Image (tube, rainbow, N blue to C red):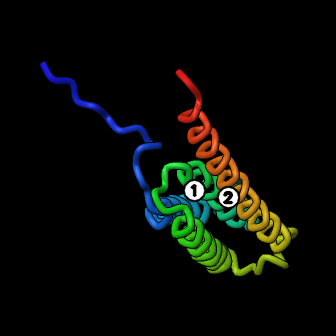
Amino acid sequence: MEQKHQKSVFEMDISPFRILLWNALAALFFQAIVYFNSTGSNAFLPRTQYTVALSFLMVFSLFSAVLSLASQKPDDYWWKSLVSYVILAITTGLTAYLFTGLTPDEAGPFKWMFFVFTFGFILLLAIFRAMRKLMNMAQKMDKRLPK
């Protein structure tokens, strides 16, 4: 009986745009839940919308950075990932604004948190890119060693 080989996530070349799509849909879903459950005595603070937006930016950052290791074209992945992050930040920030009527400045420190998360995302991508280069160098050096 032949066994099927299931691909690892690290063997798949998953586009950042696919990660963007799933994160944007999930963020919109949770923002809608917060919006529709914000009535009565158990109402959420309006700032919760921005918390949801930032949470999904963080999820996107982690998935995108980890999955960048499997990319066949790291330079293309880097730019697609940055564009996807910006699109996600704008869409989730815009939906948070539409649901609450509060700008990030009015909602507290969220303007600065968007900046910090963006800087952290770029730094995380750079770290994973450096890890990939080190891994490739180690693999090349390993081939030269006598067996």
Q: Is residue 119 visible?
A: yes
Compared to 134, does 43 lie above or below? below
Q: Is residue 45 visible?
A: no
Q: Quadrant of residue 44?
A: bottom right
Query: Is 106 placed left or right of 2 in the picture?
Result: right
Q: Nearer the viewer, mark 2 or mark 1?
A: 2
Residue closer to the observer: 114 or 81: 81
The crowding category of the residue bearing disc 2, from other C-alpha atoms within 10 Å (few below 14, some 14 to 19, many at least 20), is: many
Query: Is 93 placed left or right of 8 in the picture?
Result: right
Query: Is 97 placed left or right of 28 in the picture?
Result: right
Name the spot of residue 110 as percent of width and height, x first. Answer: 81, 69
Name the spot of residue 14 as percent of width and height, x first. Answer: 43, 56
Q: Secondary structure at mark 1?
A: helix
Name the spot of residue 83 as percent of width and height, x first. Answer: 58, 75
Residue at 56 percent of width and 67 percent of height: 75
Residue closer to the observer: 141 or 51: 141
Marks 2 and 1 sit apart, C-alpha to C-alpha, by 8 Å
The amino acid type found where label 1 is placed reads Ser
Q: Which residue is mark 1?
A: 64
Q: Secondary structure at mark 2?
A: helix
The amino acid type found where label 2 is placed reads Leu
Residue at 57 percent of width and 35 percent of height: 144
Residue at 76 percent of width and 66 percent of height: 47
Residue closer to the observer: 92 or 146: 146
The crowding category of the residue bearing disc 1, from other C-alpha atoms within 10 Å (few below 14, some 14 to 19, many at least 20), is: many
Q: Quadrant of residue 141?
A: top right
Q: Which residue is mark 2?
A: 125
Query: Is 17 placed left or right of 48 in the picture?
Result: left
